[in-house]
Amino acid sequence: MRTFDDLIKEVQNPGLCHRCGACVAFCAAINYGALELDSEGQPRYADRDRCIEGGLCYVICPAIDELKEETKRSVDWTAPMGRVSDIRIARAKDPAIRNTATDGGAVTALLVYLFQRRQIDAAVVTKPAGPFKRESFLAATEEDIRSSAGSFFDISYGMKSLSDHYSTYSQIGAFHSKIKNGFHRVAFVGTPCQIQAIRKMQAINIFPSDAVKLCLGLLCSGNFIFGEKQRRMVAQIGNFQWERVNKINIKEKLMVHLKGGEVRTIKLSDLNFMKRFPCNFCDDFSAEYADISFGGLGADEGWTTVIIRSPIGRKFFSSAKSKAIEENEEGCHLYHANKALKRVRHWSDKKKTMARESRKTLGSKFPGLKLKDCSF
């Protein structure tokens, strides 16, 4: 039985930890208290003596190949980039959401709509935690959801906030969960690695994933660190001053929107110096295991590319359409949607290729290391 010690050896030491927080969330949710996150979002032992060495923290890690086939079956995954039921180009109808959100605000609009109609009790999102930094939290009010709108660049601690709202009682052979505050229907917004971890937990029906009823994934070319040094270098590459920046966004390039309307663009290949190391080994660009995937790639400025993947994703999106979300009907909608899907597939293939090549290099540095299979 593999344990957290094996995660340290196989994931943390080679630099593959995505800091999604799944291992800590599970451990905290069932009140073992063996694991915690450090100040940088890295899992570590809080009390080694409390670890029962059950191995579940190991198998739910998105950097590990365990449960791969079970997870694919649970979401009807199909090659080459997961199930694609439908694709839309959409945005929030509410101008207030569009003004603060990224890529048209479709995610925020959908969450607000579902919360107003009591179809969800809460949503795991991220909120500002300082300049260029966000942290995960459980949004339990409409205002919480609205205030979380905006760009996602440095996302960590993805599931810890969900487990904080759990208290459990355990016996040998059985676990019984009780959700504080009545949060039984939670929407989870996250990056592909976070969504994969949730799905692995759901595949074996462990806490706290039983409360997650809707997974909304974000298209992700990588998680970027906007530290002081990185910001100076980006400003130099893009020839701008940060005090003039209104907002930044990532599509096929980094888009820096300056006050006054000017936009500076920087190729993503020029930003490798600020990309988190484990992102080089991730093969999921389009959040392939989500109920709905969202991103700006392939859509005009101010609009969101929406990939509907599951029946529940279609149900929720359809109920919000025309009430909280509007679709881009300019010209041939089908043509623009298919064009967007083609761009997403291109970037998906590109990320899978990068992950395979990166893992070959890593394997030579860590002989005997079990590397996740990036084939599909």
Image (cartoon, grey):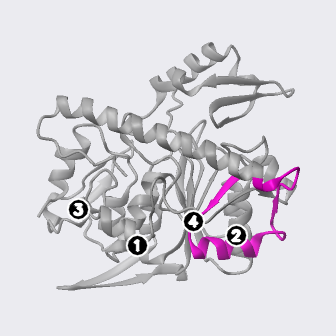
Question: Label 4 belongs to which residue?
Answer: 309
Q: Earlier in the sequence, mark 2 or mark 4?
A: 4
Closest to the camera, between mark 3 and mark 2, is 2
Q: Residue at x 21, y 51 (%)?
A: 7
Name the spot of residue 133 as percent of width and height, x first: 55, 40
The residue indicated by pointer 1 is 74
Q: CA distance from mark 1 to mark 3?
A: 29 Å
Secondary structure state at the residue bearing disc 3 = loop
Considering only order in the chain, which callout, 1 or 2, is on the residue closer to the N terminus?
1
Residue at which label 2 appears: 317
Residue at the disc numbered 3: 34
* Amino acid at circle 4: Arg
Q: Which residues are magenta?
A: 305-334
Tag 2: residue type?
Phe
Q: Is residue 92 above or below residue 310?
A: above
Q: Nearer the viewer, residue 137 or 94?
A: 94
The mark lying in front, picked from 3 and 4, is 4
Eye-nearest disc, 2 or 4: 4
| Label 2 packing within 10 angstroms: few (<14), some (14-19), many (20+) | many
Residue 83 position within the rendered picture, expressed as x and y whole percent measured from the top left:
52, 63
